[in-house]
Amino acid sequence: MENTQTFPRYRQASASPRIRHAAYSIVRGQAEDQPWVRPALIGLLGTTALLYLWNLAASGWANAYYSAAVLAGTKSWAAFFFGSLDASNFITVDKAPAALWVMEISARLFGFNAWSVLAPQALEGVATVAIVYLAVRRYFGPAAGLLAGAVVALTPVAGLMFRFNNPDALLVLLITAATYATLRAIENGRTRWLVLAGALIGFGFLAKELQAFIIIPVLAGVYLIAGPPSTGRRIGQVLAAAVAVIVSSGWWVAAVELMPSASRPYIGGSQNNDLISLIFGYNGFGRLTGNESGSVGGFGALGSRWGLTGWNRLFNSQFGGQISWLIPAAIILLGASLLLTFRRPRTDIVRAAFLIWGGSLLLTGAVFSFAQGIIHPYYTVALAPAIGALVGMGGVFLWQHRSERIARLALGAAVAATALWAYVLLDRSATFVPALRTAVLVAGLAAAALIVGLSNASRKTALAVAALGVMAVLASPAAYTFDTVSTAHTGAIPSAGPAVAAASGAGGPFAGGGATGGFGPPGGAFGGGFAGSLRAVGPNSASGGGGNSGDGGVGNPGGGGFLNSGRPAAALVSLLQADASRYTWVAATIDANNAAGYELATGDPVMAIGGFNGTDPAPTLAQFQKNVRDGKIHYFIAGGRGLGSGSTSSNASQISAWVQQTFTATTVGGVTVYDLTTAAA
């Protein structure tokens, strides 16, 4: 018979604690906690903070594209609001600006530097681990919460993105908090919790747009199934949450859309200066279909630049080492736990928790697996909280029911599958701690066998077996995570863990025999074209295509190029800074990453012609010529490698050709520069 007393009792609706009480209880602990709980939790959060904050500035500006936008936001409130790449508000980044707002507030408070830019993401990571702990511990006990939090903290892609300045860190924090709020609503039926979940998802939209909405069907569906109120009231509550989503995500969209285009920057990433088309096109359904106007797009299962689509995408050479270590275990534990809770009442919170976290993992994983447009391995950080929660909940739930054969078999299968899959993943990095894969395999299979045969063992023996199993499943991702946090990462497409040999047929955006998780060297799948411009993108080639975009190191003398930003030579920086205050933009150059390198080096606005990809039709040749006549742009810097720079029909190419024909070229710091204030004879 199922022993429901093994789970901590949760408070009913009449005694639901406030959010601040939940946060305070993280440190204070619960009155019924055993002595080890509070030190273990403090140790988990403290270790996570150390892991994510240690040597953080080694990555310099990390993604210089967003760092330049942060710099702009510290100098201009208009740039802050719109998410502009430059303080003169020529063009925005290609995402909504919520993640930038957090970094910009930090930089305004503590000064603009690598720490103030990157530390917010690290703290968001610690907060995510804490929320996962709260969400799991509330219904499954502190041991489950600690295991869940540890899994999240030690996921390699989490160790990467919670130390990086892409929008994903804030997105993950917000959707994790929304999941917790939905569970609270299912527990007590309070509308305010469901509305809070909607508001959090809406704000997540302002971090990374439609990706935040992926889990809405899961949260709404599980509440409609398991919420305590009557059917009509549940429907009304879900509609109220939908209104919260619309309001919290739509206010900024409405403000931008209602403002005349002449009074705001160009919407980067769009082909028509329209935010709605960016949201639903380039950053929306285009990611699913591959039909992304102005982007490099994809070709679906036939051979996308972003890798072959299919159920196994998350396990291939690009994605596997980032996130997949515990996916098999999470799915096994989910299935067995749902089977054991199948006959429980409709409102059972334990089953609802499995449905919410499991549904989030499966739906988000399916979207990533079958998306035909732009997708990068680091996106999978969104799966880490669900995997951690399922492993923590399922592991402890089945362990407490190990007297039942199905529970022991599922636990053993989860540990064995994790050990076997870890062996495969570690073998892809054959030179990385070679003995680890054998040790993990042996320990995992031994623990699995002991768990299956364990039914009436003593408490000490049971704890020893459980500890062996936990160490076996966490050792490999932990090793990858430690390698990740000890390596500097820069550029637009960072990758966690050591170098990985590309698997045969894995495909990928830059696959071509490189040993960096599918991001190969020049002359790869696209010869000397798109891939060739990148040089090498991966965890062990931090400089990427344009040198080091951080504060130190030696990079290319130019500003970089598509996907990476370099560090300009001192002579060029001095030239740009001379009389900078007289100009709206000290320079103009093709593609945003190229511009970002100069912007960070000089501290002054640089016009990014063509936006991130170099394909945005902004400015037109006529607009650029007018800005030159009005004396708003001092220099034009050649060398941008945006995707549109080679097309004679693109605005960028027209501008480049006009500048070459009209002005005299000089070379400064190894870069070709045109003074736009002095026309050629």
Image (spheres, grey):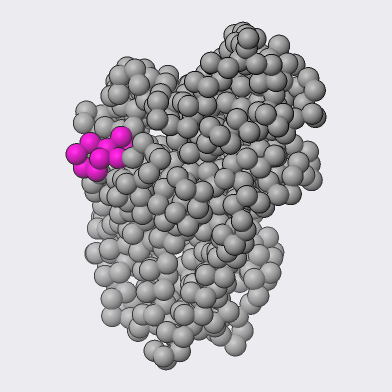
At horizontal 47% and vertical 57% (from top left) the residue drawn is: 276
Q: State which quarter of the image contains the N terminus.
A: bottom left
Q: Is residue 630 above or below residue 48?
A: above
Front residue of 458 and 279:
279
Q: Is residue 73 left or right of residue 447?
A: right
Magenta region includes residue 654: no
Q: Is residue 565 above or below residue 46?
A: above
At horizontal 76% and vertical 22% (from top left) the residue drawn is: 577
Front residue of 677 and 77:
677
Q: Please count the marks in the image.
A: 0
At horizontal 70% and vertical 44% (from top left) the residue drawn is: 73
Q: Is residue 82 left or right of residue 205?
A: right
Quadrant position of residue 531 = top left
Q: Residue furthest front?
A: 681
Q: Which residues are magenta?
A: 298-306
Front residue of 562 and 393:
562
Q: Is residue 641 left or right of residue 17?
A: left
Residue 655 x %, y %:
52, 26
Residue 661 x %, y %:
53, 16
Residue 327 x %, y %:
34, 50
Q: Residue furthest left?
A: 302
At horizontal 43% and vertical 50% (from top left) the residue drawn is: 283
Front residue of 533 and 681:
681
